[in-house]
């Protein structure tokens, strides 16, 4: 027998009422800020709603929710750490020629969407080949091949929009 929308909402409401204060306490003890804790709790409860059919109805319910919260917290801090590393890397790099920003975006826009996504995930989100493989649903070896080819296409596009060979090589390094 399938569950109706009203029953699903009631089951989630019961889970939310039982889990929210406990997950909030957990997140507050582990997060670096109250805002981070609120984000973790919101994301945890969203996962619980989306995966409500997988939530145990017995004594395993709270351990399941804590497991989700733990993974959400880990993902949150991986993202924060990735952004921090990117900001630090940008601060260390010499300022680019102001015209290069538009030229790089023009070159990226000229690429196929798959190449553009791959390059920006690698460079701006700082994902490694294993992480890219998960995102794209391919093997790390296939990522390496596609990334190599996409970098070459980017270098050619950069040359077309007027970035010199030396600057193209430097720009390509950002995508490694």
Image (tube, rainbow, N blue to C red):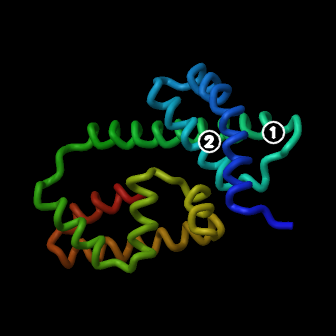
Q: Which residue is mark 2?
A: 44
- Which badge, 2 or 1, comes first in the chain's sequence? 2
Image quarter where the C terminus lies is bottom left
Q: Quadrant of residue 161?
A: bottom left
List x then y, in percent, for residue 137.
63, 69
**Res 58 quadrant in image:** top right
The tag on residue 41 is none
Residue 61, label in figure: 1
Q: What residue do we see at 50% from left, 32% from top?
A: 38
Describe residue 63's horizontal placement relative to residue 162 as left or right.
Answer: right
> For this rendering, which residue is in front, 155 or 68?
68
134 and 26: which is toward the camera? 26
Element at label 1 = helix
Q: Position of residue 141 (x, y in %)?
A: 63, 68
**Residue 56, x across and y down, in percent:** 83, 45
Note whether 63 is above or below 30 in the view shown. Answer: below
């Amino acid at each position: 027998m399938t569950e109706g929308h009203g029953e699903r909402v009631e089951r989630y409401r019961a889970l939310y009422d039982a889990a929210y204060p406990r997950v909030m306490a957990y997140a507050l003890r582990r997060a670096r800020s109250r805002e981070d804790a609120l984000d973790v709790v919101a994301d945890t409860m969203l996962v619980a709603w989306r995966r409500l059919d997988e939530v145990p109805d017995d004594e395993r319910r709270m351990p399941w929710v804590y497991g989700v919260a733990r993974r959400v917290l880990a993902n949150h801090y991986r993202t924060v750490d990735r952004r921090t590393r990117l900001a630090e890397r940008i601060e260390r790099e010499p300022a680019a020629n102001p015209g290069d920003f538009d030229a790089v975006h023009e070159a990226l826009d000229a690429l196929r969407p798959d190449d553009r996504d791959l390059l920006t995930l690698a460079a701006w989100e700082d994902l490694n080949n294993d992480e890219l493989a998960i995102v794209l649903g391919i093997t790390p070896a296939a990522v390496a091949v596609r990334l190599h080819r996409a970098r070459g296409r980017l270098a050619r596009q950069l040359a077309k929009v007027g970035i010199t060979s030396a600057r193209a090589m430097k720009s390509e390094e950002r995508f490694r």
